[in-house]
């Protein structure tokens, strides 16, 4: 038989009977493998982006979230897109259909990489109890991806532990010929001279040009290198090896001399190896190891030895197996992950001194009576999460009952998490100084200085001469380590029923969470009706419940505060102090008003209603959708106050409570070309997304800064209220248009992305304060109008073929091409400027 005849038999014989391929006799002729795939059909609430879409998009950060600005139902955190932090490699926070940004499910090759320890952390790097964190613990370079799936609504029962949506990324499986090794190597580059800064006001201009710091990155160089190697070793084994490194070098002002700068670095690494084993057509396995590392340097202007580094390190190992039997198929997923968020200081203490010529004088801008600081803030800290998880999913072959066809799916999962909070060394903050007088510093006392100085408590008093100075008071944050455990299990079942023009998917998911000590039942229902029995018109409805997470930090927060105390010694220096008597220091437990108490928490959940009209008409794909989300039992930090002996209201303690999270309605319209159309010698494809969100949800994160006792309350239009109670006031309307062009006679591609956000009013901090009768001051907030936002991004590539299977691809990306001046406001009420025009160049070698 000819190879063509054998190929025809092989294709026709691939029909499935009860899920089991029909056997055919082995042929004596060796054939080139023919891969046949059904076209991917996105359901309502689901979008799958393919490799070409991911790599051809203008993606400045090469991150998943930066790519997802194209998604109609995704909203970005207010702090994203700051002009002052455009060299940052940190991923942006996103909200899906108004859900909290810290409660999405992130999967990479099936492994849950969401932060279950504390996805918010603290407000600043200098916090003494924690560090800023993110819901994503693995910032994978999108150059390494071949598929990205987003489920924003109508999620199936196999997905749980989220309030917003599911974002699943996959690296590529080899499809090359046996014995051939293929791959690619890419390099990209940009710097501050390729960017424009549109200043909000003179203060922001001064920060950029004179006082550039970690949040005003005036100078930077960003470059990335990525590559992957893949191939099929034989009929059974294949592999994919991928790696990426991305760096931003950001000099910041030291404050010690005119023009003196401190070099800082942000670094993001991805490394992965996946092996594929297919012993026969009914069984296949994947084995994978992955490594992700995001670290950044930090430095506080004018503070000597304040250098620090934070690092988010994630390692995963996974085994996945799929088995095809005569009447069903089953998938197994076994994963292990460890994530560590660590902060290390150059000097793990902080000391304040008065200016003394010839001794405490490392800053040129201080004079007599001024203070200087040496050392870091916050101290060395380690937050660690270890997770072991297993999930199985069983799908029965479709079968008929009367006139209905059923497709059953059921499965279960178990996850074991441990969280570790550790302060490896004591951290002391020395703040109060006294006159050394006629005494001499004891030998070895580093907190004593004999240099003469002039001191005055404020500018209205006369100078007093001191014969030296010594520290006599400080706050100590003691070394400690605590561990919490969380066990989660789930069982789910679903029946997908088809009857004539109607399809219904009934599902039920049961989750157990050991932290909340409860069992939660989540019903899932979606209905699909096609009145014409084809894809010309489809109506979709859905009623779903999603349970989120109670994070490990809620178990540990109370214990963390137990090791705070005060150090003090006499205000008259004693010459008999020595190392043997600890230089006169005594320790007492602090009666801190910022104590924490534990509380019982219920699992947060959201109830979803969906209605959509979908049509495929004349090569157009049209979808009109409404998603309603109601958020309940949302985790929120609560502050409880009391009256002190002077009848002044002070903070008694903090705790976590469940509160009503509010409601969000998202209306969206998506219009796209199902297939590209030809115009002259080019093909074109358009996708338009319009969305309107009416958001009445809680503002901000579930935690406030631990060192902030009153800023949570603000003064607005004659009323005192919590800042978090201000309603979310972001742009309600947005329009996203992508236009992809590909040459037919010339190997070039061009991708345009237009993003418009409507004008809106928001709440800003006026920099004024309101004083209560008790003497307490609080910030004054007011409404401010912000103009609409518009950006136009372009990415262009040209492929130069070197030889068979070898090519160079030249790429140029420009974001905000028109350099539109856009301004907005942070969660803290601070107005700021968004990024201006930026240009990136990249080069890829494929072989």
Image: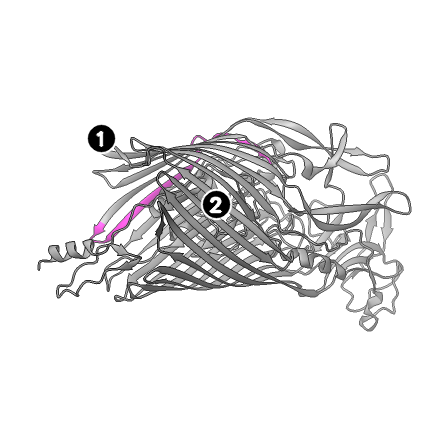
Tell me where residue 156 appears, x and y as whole percent.
46, 49
Q: Is residue 820 magenta?
A: yes
Q: How many marks?
A: 2
Residue 506 visible in the displayed image: yes
Q: Residue at x 66, y 28 (%)?
A: 783
Instruction: Give the residue at mark 2.
Output: 65
Which SS class for mark 1? loop
Position of the C terminus, as image quadrant, is bottom left
| Label 1 neighbour load within 10 Å: few <14, some 14-19, many 20+ | few
Whole-angstrom CA distance, mark 1 to mark 2, is: 35 Å
Tell me where residue 654 appears, x and y as whole percent.
75, 50
Report the side of 522 relative to 639 (left or right): left
Tell me where residue 332 appears, x and y as whole percent.
43, 62
Residue, far right: 645
Q: Earlier in the sequence, mark 1 or mark 2?
A: 2
Residue 376 visible in the displayed image: no
Residue, far bottom: 580
Instruction: Give the residue at mark 1.
Output: 680
Position of the N terminus, as image quadrant, is bottom left
Q: Residue at x 73, y 49 (%)?
A: 707
The residues colored magenta run 802-826
Q: Quadrant of residue 754?
A: top left
| Label 2 neighbour load within 10 Å: few <14, some 14-19, many 20+ | many
Against 390, is 596 above or below? Answer: above
């Amino acid at each position: 038989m000819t190879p063509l005849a054998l190929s025809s038999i092989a294709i026709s014989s691939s029909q499935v009977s009860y899920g089991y391929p029909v056997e055919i006799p082995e042929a004596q002729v060796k054939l080139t493998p023919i891969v046949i795939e059904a076209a991917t059909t996105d359901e309502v609430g689901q979008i799958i982006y393919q490799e070409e879409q991911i790599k051809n998009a203008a993606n400045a950060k090469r991150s998943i979230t930066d790519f997802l600005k194209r998604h109609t139902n995704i909203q970005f955190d207010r702090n994203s897109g700051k002009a002052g932090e455009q060299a940052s490699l940190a991923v942006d926070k996103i909200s899906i259909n108004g859900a909290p940004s810290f409660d999405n499910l992130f999967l990479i090759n099936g492994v849950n990489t969401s932060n279950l320890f504390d996805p918010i952390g603290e407000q600043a790097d200098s916090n003494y109890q924690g560090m800023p964190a993110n819901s994503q613990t693995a910032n994978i370079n999108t150059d390494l991806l071949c598929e990205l799936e987003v489920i924003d609504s109508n999620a199936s029962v196999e997905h749980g532990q989220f309030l917003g949506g599911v974002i699943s990324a996959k690296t590529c499986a080899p499809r090359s010929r046996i014995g051939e090794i293929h791959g690619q190597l890419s390099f990209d580059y940009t710097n501050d001279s390729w960017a424009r800064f549109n200043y909000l006001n003179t203060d922001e201009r001064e920060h950029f040009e004179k006082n550039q710091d970690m949040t005003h990155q005036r100078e930077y160089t960003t470059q990335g290198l990525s590559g992957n190697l893949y191939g099929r070793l034989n009929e059974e084994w294949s592999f994919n090896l991928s790696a990426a490194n991305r760096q931003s070098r950001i000099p910041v002002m030291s404050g010690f001399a005119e023009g003196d700068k401190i070099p800082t670095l942000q670094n993001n690494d991805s490394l992965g190896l996946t092996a594929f084993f297919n012993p026969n057509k009914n069984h296949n396995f994947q084995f994978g190891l992955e490594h992700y590392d995001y670290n950044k340097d930090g430095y506080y202007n004018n503070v000597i030895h304040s250098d620090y580094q934070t690092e988010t390190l994630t390692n995963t190992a996974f085994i996945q197996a799929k088995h095809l039997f005569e009447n069903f198929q089953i998938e197994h997923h076994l994963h292990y992950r460890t994530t560590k968020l660590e902060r290390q200081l150059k000097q793990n203490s902080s000391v304040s001194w008065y200016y003394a010529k010839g001794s405490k004088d490392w800053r040129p801008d201080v004079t007599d009576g001024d203070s200087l600081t040496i050392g870091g803030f916050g101290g060395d800290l380690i937050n660690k999460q270890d997770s072991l998880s297993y999930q199985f999913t069983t799908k029965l072959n479709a079968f008929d009952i009367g006139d209905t066809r059923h497709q059953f799916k059921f499965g279960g999962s178990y996850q074991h998490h441990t969280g570790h909070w550790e302060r490896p060394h004591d951290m002391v903050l020395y703040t109060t100084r006294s006159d050394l007088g006629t005494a001499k510093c004891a030998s070895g006392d580093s907190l004593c200085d004999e240099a003469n100085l002039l001191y005055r408590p404020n500018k209205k008093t006369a100078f007093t001469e001191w014969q030296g100075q010594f520290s006599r008071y400080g706050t100590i944050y003691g070394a400690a380590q605590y561990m919490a455990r969380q066990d989660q299990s789930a069982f789910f079942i679903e029946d997908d029923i088809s009857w004539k023009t109607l399809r219904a998917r009934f599902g039920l998911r049961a989750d157990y969470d050991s932290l909340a000590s409860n069992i939660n039942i989540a019903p899932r229902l979606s209905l699909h009706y096609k009145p014409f029995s084809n894809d010309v018109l489809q109506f979709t409805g859905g009623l779903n419940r999603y349970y989120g997470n109670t994070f490990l930090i809620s178990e540990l927060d109370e214990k963390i505060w137990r090791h705070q105390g005060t150090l003090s010694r006499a205000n008259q220096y004693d010459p008999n102090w020595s190392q043997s008597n600890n230089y006169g220091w005594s320790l007492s437990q602090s009666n801190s008003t910022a104590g924490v108490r534990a509380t019982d928490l219920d699992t947060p959940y959201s109830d979803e209603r969906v209605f959509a009209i979908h049509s495929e008409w004349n090569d157009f794909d049209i979808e009109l959708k409404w998603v309603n989300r109601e958020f309940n039992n949302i985790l929120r930090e609560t502050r409880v106050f009391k009256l002190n002996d002077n009848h002044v209201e002070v903070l008694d303690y903090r705790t976590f409570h469940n509160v009503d999270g509010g409601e969000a309605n998202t209306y969206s319209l998506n219009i796209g070309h199902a297939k590209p159309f030809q115009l002259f010698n080019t093909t074109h494809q358009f996708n338009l997304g319009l969305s309107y969100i009416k958001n009445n949800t809680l503002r901000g994160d579930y935690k406030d800064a631990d060192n902030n006792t009153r800023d949570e309350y603000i003064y607005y239009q004659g009323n005192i209220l919590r800042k978090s109670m201000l309603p979310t006031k972001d742009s309600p309307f947005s329009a996203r248009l992508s236009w992809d062009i590909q040459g037919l006679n010339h190997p070039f591609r061009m991708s345009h992305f237009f993003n418009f956000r409507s004008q809106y009013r928001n709440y800003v901090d006026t920099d004024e304060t309101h004083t209560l009768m008790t003497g307490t001051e609080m910030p004054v907030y007011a409404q401010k109008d912000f103009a609409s936002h518009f950006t136009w991004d372009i990415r262009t590539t040209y492929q130069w073929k070197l030889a068979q299977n070898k090519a160079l691809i030249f790429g140029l990306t420009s974001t905000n091409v028109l350099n539109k001046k856009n301004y907005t406001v942070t969660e803290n009420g601070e107005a700021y400027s968004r990024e201006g025009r930026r240009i990136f160049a990249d080069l890829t070698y494929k072989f």
